[in-house]
Image (cartoon, rainbow, N blue to C red):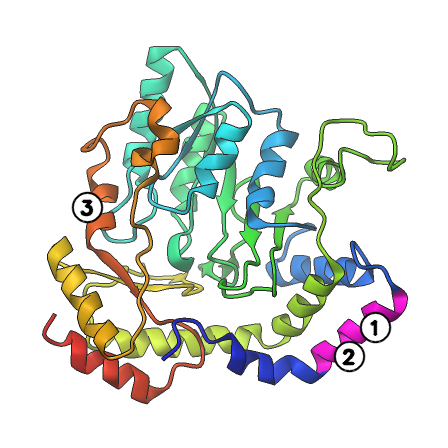
Amino acid sequence: MEFLDLKTQQKRIRKPLEKRINKILDHGAYIMGPEVFELEEKLADYCGVKHAISCSSGTDALLIPLMAWGIGPGDAVFTTPFTYVATAEVISILGATPVFVDVYESTYNIDCGMLEIEINKVIKEGKLKPKAIIPVDLFGLPARYRIIDKIAKKYNLKVIEDAAQSFGGSIRGKRVGTFGDVAATSFYPAKPLGCYGDGGAIFTNDDSLAEECKAIRIHGTKQDKYNSEMIGLNGRLDSIQAAVLLEKLKIFDEELEMRNTVSSCYRKFLNNSQYLPKDYQSALALFSVVLGSKEKRDDLITRLSKNNIPTVIYYKFPIHLMNAFKYLGYSKGDLPISESLSNKIVSLPMHPYISREDINSIQLITKNK
């Protein structure tokens, strides 16, 4: 059994993809070729935003807007510790300070009540200036942006939707990519919409911010590529990755429906998975369950492994307890929900092409969890 089956998907798109790649080999624009601009147009149309700016990775998609806003030393950016390290990493790279906010036990997304508490703590201490919030749409489920946006407006903070796992999700019919001031997604191969290398995109309705982000991704250049107008980076997308995404986008909605079917099958016999609020549509990047203890989690992993069923732990270590972030001064027990989830959570195989037989096999093994 595959944890992620890209081979079956590739069979569906192989012929048109090869045609697109051959076209790239003929025109020779391997970076930022016409496929890239075609992709940006289709991504913007899909999400319903004015601007989709492709870039080289989901990490750069988070980093570039922070650079455009001039966030740096002395600034506080609020985010969750229960996610992939890149979310906090981009804050630290710029010299700003990540301030971690614990998550809801049910959805694993940022706890909005705790968010406001942490903002007020920073204001009261007076050492840092609150500047932005990076909520994470964990495992494909959008965060509570209606509440987050109210908090952001109250304290004059920017919001970056970390949609690395949630492209294709929605809230009340409004698609991911439209929440906050800007959204960032990843096209890493394991994502619901993934390429065959690294890639990412930034989404916004802000014309000025879009222009800044476009310049930053090409070494800070606007008019003359040999005359940088600001500090930037090499954040361009390869044409071949854009070609892969264009073909995958054609079957993307169908695959989302297939993921939803898999999720529904799992939920018939697993009642300890991520809670999906009413009117929220997850992109179902991962399907995770929380066991009663670390020992029970490890026992389930062992039993599944003996039956050749792969599992992955997302996330084994909450960011605030990683060695790289020791300088922030967090201790074990500071963010108890995130720490508990890290000890008890495990992700099961999730992709559009899981068979009913595979799901039945998982059911037999997990029923005595």
Residue 22 painted magenta: yes
Q: Is residue 343 visible?
A: yes
Quadrant where the C terminus sits is bottom left
- In the image, what residue occupies the spot 32% across and 62% down? 312
Q: Which element is circle 3 on?
A: helix
Image height of 221 relative to 344, above or below:
above
Q: Which element is circle 1 on?
A: helix
**Label 2 packing within 10 angstroms: few (<14), some (14-19), many (20+):** few
Q: Which element is circle 2 on?
A: helix
| Residue that carries the numbered disc 1 in the rendered image | 23
Q: Report how far apart the C-alphas of labels 3 and 2 lie in the structure.
A: 48 Å
Q: Amino acid at mark 1?
A: Lys
* Percent of width and height locating residue 41: 73, 59
| Residue that carries the numbered disc 2 in the rendered image | 19
Residue extending farthest to the front is 306
Residue 133 painted magenta: no
Quadrant housing residue 215: top right
- In the image, what residue occupies the spot 41% across and 62% down? 282
Q: Nearer the viewer, residue 78 or 194?
A: 194
In the image, the segment drawn in magenta is 16-27
Question: Of label 3 and label 2, which has the lower sequence position?
Answer: 2
* Percent of width and height locating residue 89: 48, 36
* Left or right, 188 with reference to 220: left
* Left or right, 151 with reference to 249: left
**Label 1 packing within 10 angstroms: few (<14), some (14-19), many (20+):** some
| Residue that carries the numbered disc 3 in the rendered image | 340
Residue extending farthest to the bottom is 357
* Percent of width and height locating residue 321: 29, 35
Q: Amino acid at mark 2?
A: Lys
Q: Amino acid at mark 3?
A: Ser
